[in-house]
Image (cartoon, grey):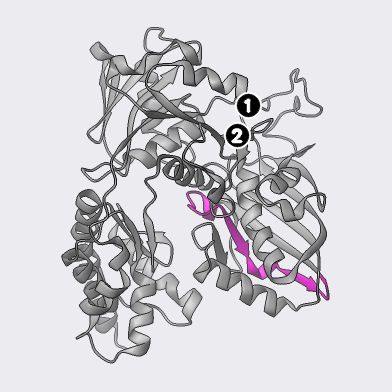
Amino acid sequence: MTADKYLQSWQERFELAEAMQPLIGKLYRNQGVEVLIYGRPLLNASTIDITKAHRLVKKYEGSKLRLRESFPFIEALSRLNVKHARVDIGKMAVSYWRNHGDASEIEAYMAEQLAPAVDKVLAPRDVVLYGFGRIGRLLARLLIERTGVSNTMRLRAIVVRGGREGDLEKRASLLRRDSIHGPFNGSIEVDAENNALIANGTYIQVIYANSPDQVDYTAHGIDNALVVDNTGIWSDEEGLGQHLQSKGVAKVLLTAPAKGEIKNVVFGVNDDQVLEDDRIISAASCTTNAITPVLKSVYDKFGINSGHVETVHSYTNDQNLIDNYHKADRRGRSAPLNMVITSTGAAKAVAKAFPELKGKLTGNAIRVPTPNVSMAIMNLNLGQQTTREEMNEYLRWVALHSDLQNQVDYTTSTELVSTDLVGSRFAGIIDSEATIVEEDRTVLYVWYDNEFGYSCQVVQVMQKMLGVNALSLP
């Protein structure tokens, strides 16, 4: 290929990506349809991001997906009355072109594949974020990016302590800028007179309260709402139950492990346990969400007799910047300067979501001087012998085609490092190049964005609790 042809090819791809953008936007805003390429969402993606998502298909299929091959599928989708669905155009296009020689049957093929989502109706529900720290602000970003007439979860308010002069502007600034996840994708206005933020057209009431039972949400036009508690202050039924005493609250979701009989839900693994009459649910921890889908997958195929999970975890706000008093062992030492051995309950927590592994796992953690993205190293004794090739091929299938494809990602990169995974929407990413297998023993390395990936899992639990889950197709 000559130099001019490389440029011409790039121009063609760029123009097709530009043509996709308005179609992708309208599909979501008007129909609640999220378009993906092999698990990578294209909503609000740049032309470069769309092009790169197509190139990534080669990692899974051995050859890249061309934009001219996928564009007709997006056009066909825009003509169908599909609603409230996550449609992986990449997988549909690859499957179609393997079995068809021309484009004449694309529309009929799409209509058949997407029939379950035609004219699907979901009523919107109100959401309140109680607390506005790291997870709270990321959840706000995820909810706001879904703004549109077809949005099924509407962020109506955030509840925080304080109310001091300048507080509202500070909250807005923290939402606008993030040292790890970058700037907010849009505009944020402050309505000081009414104590509100307006983000990409979403009107968010800011409510100041010192206790969960002090708020009358109906006074702000909020009713039958899901309150997402991000504070970490309360973790049992008595504490979280205070939210239910406030007018306008229907259900409560905790973004941390819960105590007692509260269900700890890892979406994709045990979300079938979420019942309509459940009023308080926990979304477990970031580490539990990262490792449980992978552990379940391995157990289902190879069995697990025992194992140890070591978490190499970025430091958190609970630690000190410089050496100072802390009630926990070692955590008082400076987080940016030290590796800190500490405990984790994630290994035991796995059993709450996947009881088959009860008593089979131990776990520990090392906090390291990075601000985000962690890794779980899983040393497992399997129920049968296997090979590295068989293990990796199976985990690749899990990431591509299993019921856990939205939770588990898979990489073959030999150059991947932690910062490459900031913003990953998967619960865990299997580093296949690091996989070790020796007869009936395996060591698996699973990366995870302990902030953003976890927040994406929380959003799916929210949808499940409110009964507004989008169908994933195909």
The answer to whether residue 19 is above or below residue 313 is: below
Disc 2 crowd rating (10 Å Cα; few below 14, some 14-19, many 20+) is many
Q: From the image, which quarter does the N terminus lie in?
A: bottom left
> Callout 1: few (<14), some (14-19), or many (20+) C-alpha neighbours within 10 Å?
many
Q: Is residue 270 visible?
A: yes
Residue 279: x %, y % from top left: 50, 31
Relative side of 384 to 93, left or right: right
Question: Can you identify the residue that label 2 sits on?
Answer: 256
Percent of width and height locating residue 49: 35, 60
Tell me the quarter of the picture where residue 338 sits. top right
Read off the magenta span. 420-440
Residue 341 is one of the magenta-drawn residues: no
Q: Which residue type does callout 2 highlight? A: Ala
Judge by depth and name the residue closer to the eye, 291 or 166.
Answer: 291
Whether residue 234 is visible: no
Q: Position of residue 435 (x, y in %)?
A: 71, 68
Residue mark closest to the camera, 2 vs 1: 1
